[in-house]
Amino acid sequence: MRMKHCPAEFKAGAVALYRPRPGATIKSVAGDLVVNTETLRNRIRASFRRPLLAAGRRSCQW
């Protein structure tokens, strides 16, 4: 399988599509966008960690 290199705008848009949809699953959003489920899951996780790293925290304290 050939890897696709997507622009940052597409990646941010994919995460933005997932967040506001109540009941949406990563699998359904990934299917709509024709991207790998794990790729989208990693993007979503990274988007949640980014604000913590900007605040100087290394990890999330649950």
Image (cartoon, rainbow, N blue to C red):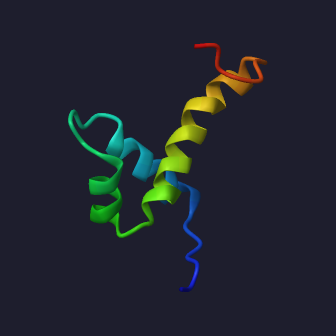
Q: Is residue 49 left or right of residue 29?
A: right
The percent coordinates of residue 53 (x first, y second) are 73, 26
The percent coordinates of residue 6 (x first, y second) are 55, 67
- Residue at image location 24% in from the left, 42% down from the top: 24
Check the image and report above or below for 52 versus 8. above
The extreme front residue here reads: 62
Check the image and report above or below for 26 versus 22. below
The extreme bottom residue here reads: 1
Residue 48, by quadrant, is top right
- Residue at image location 24% in from the left, 37% down from the top: 21
The percent coordinates of residue 2 (x first, y second) are 56, 85
- Residue at image location 57% in from the left, 56% down from the top: 8
Check the image and report above or below for 17 versus 19. below
Q: Give whichever of 9, 51 is nearer the camera.
A: 51
Q: Give whichever of 56, 36 is nearer the camera.
A: 36
Residue 62, by quadrant, is top right
